[in-house]
Amino acid sequence: MAVELDTLHKVVTPENIDLQVECAGPVSRCLAYLIDLGIRALVMLVLGLLALFLDRVGVGLLMLGWFALDWFYPVLFEVLRDGQTPGKRALGLRVVHLDLSPIRWSASLVRNLLRTVDFLPGTYLLATLSMCMTRRFQRLGDLAAGSLVVYHTPLAPTAALPEVRAISAPLALDRDEARALVDFACRANTLSGARQRELAELLAPALPGTVDDPVRYWQGVGLGLMGET
Amino acid sequence: MQLDELAIAVRQRSGWSAIDLGFTLTRLWWRALFLSWLLPAGLVFCVLHVVLYKYPQFAILLTWWLKPVFDRFPLYILSRRVFGEDTGLREALRQWREICRCDLLPWQLWRRFNPLRSFVMPVTVLERLQGKPRERRLRVLQLASGNQALWLTMICLHLETLMVFAAIMTGFLLLPAGESSQFISLAEAAAETETALLFNALSLLGMALVAPFYTAAGFTLYLNRRVELEGWDIEVSFRNLAQRLAATRSAAALLLVGVLAAGFLHAPQTLAEAPPPDPTQASAVAEVDAEVAREEIDAVLAGEAFHEVLVTTRWQWKHASEDDPEGSFPNWLILLVESLEKVWPDWDWPGFDQPLALLAWLLRFAVVVVLLALLLYVALRYRETIGRWTGRARTDAAPDAPPERLFGMAVTRESLPVDVPAEVAALWQAGEQRAAMALLYRGALSQLLHRFDIPFTHDLTERECAELVAARSPAPVAQFFGQMTRGWMRLAYGHVAPSGAWVDDLCRQWRELFGHE
C-alpha cells in the first residue's frame, strides 16, 4: 500500500522514542490570529482612551504601547506561556521548535519579527501561500526560525463504557490492533448497533466458538485491554 | 467502498485537523484539482464575457454564482483519488455530464448561500441522498463539525476577496513614490470595460486558487465525520487483524505438518534441534500436540544448556607459621605486635634479632600508621557523604520506616498541601488534569501509609498496592482506593482523562474518609 497521506510531523529522539504531532494549517491559525488581533485592538482602545487625558504625552505613550504590543505580544506569550498566545490557546494550538522542544526566545523573536515579510502585500498573503505550499504548514517566519505550530488538545474525558464484563485477550495483539479494540469498546455509544455488528463480523475468524454475542465479546476484550476488571 | 484502498490515514482527528488534511491533499494533487476547476470556469467566464460584453460586471457575477457547479469537478477527482482510484483531470472533464446532472438546481437556487456548502455537498453530490434521509444525514453530520465547516467558509470567502485586494496592493507597492495618484485614478476607471476585464480576470484567478482548497477541506471534514460515526479506523485495523490471522493460520498448519514429519523421520532426541516456533504465532503454539511439546521440553532440559559445569578460581589467604620469636624488645612493643598479630594473624612478622629487619618492620609499621591516618582524615573530611550513605542504608534496612517515595512520587506528609481536595479541584479547573490526578493519588498513598499503616514498598505495582489496601483496610477505603487506582492508571498509562464529575466524587469521598485529622 502507498504511503498514507497525513498531517503528522514525526521526530525520533536519540533515545529512540517516536514522537508525533499534528501540524496546524491555515484555517485554525488564521482564526487564532484574529482572536489575538481582537485582544490587541481592545487593549489599544483602552490605552487610547487613557491617552485622551494626557495630551501630547499621551500620544507618545500610545505610540510606545502600540510598538510594544505589536512586536512583543506574541513573543512574550509564546515564550512564557508554553508557546500559546490567547488566540492559539483558544484554538488548541502551540508553537514548538521543529524537534518539538518548547519555543525559546531566539526562535520566537525571529518568527514574529518576520511577520513584516509574511504580511506582504498587505493581508498575510505570503504567509498563506507559504502555509499552503509547505509540508508542515510553515509560514516564512516559521521556516526561518525552525518553528512549527501544532495542535495541543487536552485529553478528552472517557465516554461512558459499555456494561460488559472485561475479558482477557484471546490472542496476541500488536499495538494498533489493541488500540482498535479499545476504541471499539470506548465508542460503543457513538457507533450504531448495526455498524458494531458489522465491525465485529470482521473478526469472526478470531472468535472462540462458544461466544453468542460477538459485539459484547469484543467490547469485553477492549475493556480487558484497558485494564478494567 | 474499499476502506483498505484509502489514500489518507484514517484515525480520529479534530475538525480543524481534518480541514488541514484537505489542504494537504490539495497541495499534493494541486495540478489536477486547480485545472479541473479553472478550465470549466474559464470556459464559462469567456463565453459569458462574449455574450455580455457590454456588462462585464454581470458576467463575473454569473460566474461567481455558478461556483457550486465548478466545485463539483475537484470534488469528483478527490472522491475517486481518496479511495485509491487514479482519476485524472481528463477523466473528470469527460464525465462532465454525469458530474453536473445530480441536484443541480437546488445548489444554484436556495442552497447557493448555504454557509456549510463544501461540507454538505458530498451528501447530495456523492451519496445522492434526497429528501428525508438527506436531512437526517445532515443533522448527524453537522452535530460535531458544523462549526468548523462554517469557519472554513468564512475564511475562504475572505481569502478570495483578499486575493484580489492583495493583487491590487502589489501593483500599488510597485509604483514609484509620488505616482500613487495615477494609480488611484486608474482604480477610479474600474467602471470602464478594459479595467473591469482585468479586475474580473483577477477575481476568477482568486476564486480558482481558493476553490480547490475549500472543496477539499470540506470533503475531508465530511470524511472525518464519517470516520468518527462509522468507525472506519476500527474497520481498517480489524481487517488487518483478520488478514494477519488468516496468514498465521496457514503458516501454523504448515509448521504442524513440518514438526510431525520431523518426528517421523528422525529419532526423538533430534527434536531439540528443531527451530523453536515463532512466539508471535500464538495459535501455532496452541495447536502443537501436548505430548510432542513435553518431549521437546524434556529434550531441551536434558541438553547441554542446563548441564554446564563452571570452574572458577580466586585468591585466598593461606595460614602463616605459628612460631613467633622473642627477644630483647620493650614490653609494649611485643604486646603491640601480639595484639596486631591477633588482628592480622596472617601477617609476615619479622625476626626481631636482625636490626635491618627491625628497621624494615618499623618502616612498614609507619606506612600502616600513615595509611590509617589517611583513612581517618578521609573519614572526617567526607563524614557527611558517608553519613548520608549509611543513613540511607539504615532506612533501607529498617523494615518499619515508611518509604518517602513511591512510583517516583514523594509521599511524605510534608510534601503534600494541607487541603488536598481543594488543591486537586484548583488544578483540575486550570486544566492540569494529570497534575490533579497525580496529587490525589499521591495524597491517597500518603494517607494510607501514615494513617492506616499500609506497608507499601518500592517493589509494588499500582494494582498490588490496591490489593494490599483491599486486604488491610475497611471496605469504603478499599473501594475508594480501587476506584482511584483504576482512574489513575487509565490516565497515567492510557492517556484517557476521567470526567470532572468523577474527580469531584473522588474528592468528596476523600473528605469523608481522610478529612478528620
Image (cartoon, coloured by chain):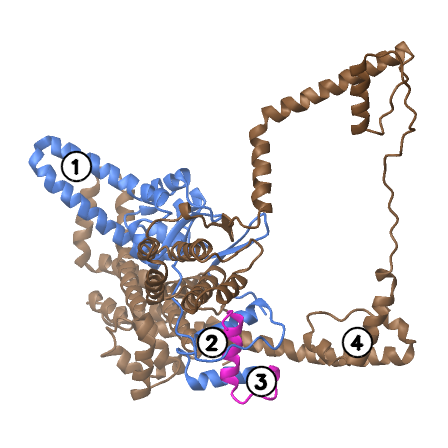
Q: Which residue is disc 1 drawn over? A: A62
Q: Is residue A225 magenta?
A: yes
In primary-sequence order, the first of circles 1 and 3 is: 1
Question: What's the distance in space between the residues labelled 1 and 4, CA to CA?
Answer: 86 Å
Q: Which residue is disc 3 drawn over? A: A204
| Vertical order, B8 against A144 (above or below) | below
Question: What's the distance in space between the residues labelled 3 and 4, CA to CA?
Answer: 29 Å
In primary-sequence order, the first of circles 1 and 2 is: 1
Q: Which residue is disc 2 drawn over? A: A185
Tell whether label 4 touches label 3 (CB within 8 Å): no
The amino acid type found where label 4 is placed reads Ala
The chain letter under disc 4 is B
Q: Which residue is disc 4 drawn over? A: B293
Q: Colour of chain A?
A: blue
The stretch of residues the image draws in magenta is A205-229
Q: Colour of chain B?
A: brown
Q: Nearer the viewer, residue B33 or B220?
A: B220
| Vertical order, B407 against A175 (above or below) | above
